[in-house]
Amino acid sequence: MILRILSFGLFMMLAATPVRAEVLIFAAASLKGPVDQIAGHFDNVVVSYGGSGTLARQISLGAPADIVLLANNDWMDVLLDGGQVVPESVTNFASNRLVLITGQNDTTVTLEPAPFLAALGEGRIAVGLTEAVPAGIYAKASLQSLGLWELTKDQLAEVDNVRAALMLVARGQTPLGIVYQTDVHVSDAVTEAAVFPAESHPPIQYLGALTHHANAEAKTVLDFISEPEGQTTFAGFGFLPPIEAAQ
């Protein structure tokens, strides 16, 4: 009887111990297309998408991701400062452009006060959270640089990731949105209306890193992202090369 109790207790302890065979990636929502395709090259990769700020906070609270792929340097710095990622594993693997979108075909909008406000009307601008979501942070910087922030800050529809901003425009809920250039290809219901000048916002860089939870397979997956086949995958979805490589 004692042996049975001990055996049952050992079984319960083993059953309660989390054993993960997969590689868990936390990735910025704008990366869904290429990262889904890259994950398909492996048998054991699981991906969770969201806003970079949300993902970084989850990891800082102990979420067991193996790899984190973010769209903003500052959020990676938060994880580095908190000791959640391996410093020598940080890699800059892609870049992007920031664009204004509308739900009307063949519509262009000049990024100057009068035409911009005419296009906006009484509606709102769909945008990522301007204090947390990278696309929203870049959008705020661009609007400030172009003298549009004070004119439009009360007409923002802020959401928790860039794909949610895209969908607000695609569904006709807002006349304008600010997203990444690669997001435009996700929906036939939106049109690129203008490209924000690169100098109007900080460089849009995508960085990846291994967390201290990383298992043995995670490094192979992260390395693949920076290798020629991985880079070709990103290029196929419209992403630009890493900033250093593009200069």
Image (cartoon, rainbow, N blue to C red):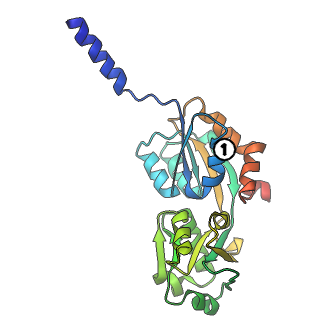
Residue depicted at 51% across the width and 65% down the height: 164
Residue depicted at 65% across the width and 72% down the height: 99
The x, y position of residue 43, in whole percent, is 61, 34
Q: Secondary structure at mark 1?
A: helix
The x, y position of residue 233, in whole percent, is 73, 49
Q: Count all numbered tags in the image, as a single digit.
A: 1
Image: 163 above or below 174:
above
Q: Quadrant of residue 146?
A: bottom right
* Quadrant (top left, top right, bottom left, bottom right) of the C terminus: bottom right
Q: Residues within 10 Å of mark 1 (few under 14, many from 20)?
A: some
Left or right, residue 232 beside residue 181:
right
The front one of 85 and 33 is 33
The x, y position of residue 44, in whole percent, is 57, 34
Q: Badge 1 is on which residue?
A: 38
Image: 18 above or below 160:
above
Q: Name the amino acid, label 1.
A: Ile
Residue depicted at 47% across the width and 63% down the height: 160
Residue depicted at 56% across the width and 55% down the height: 28
The front one of 190 and 64 is 190
Image: 79 above or below 172:
above
Q: Quadrant of residue 1?
A: top left
Image: 213 above or below 77:
above
- Residue occupying the far left of the picture: 1
The front one of 201 and 40 is 40
The x, y position of residue 96, in whole percent, is 69, 62
The front one of 237 and 93 is 237
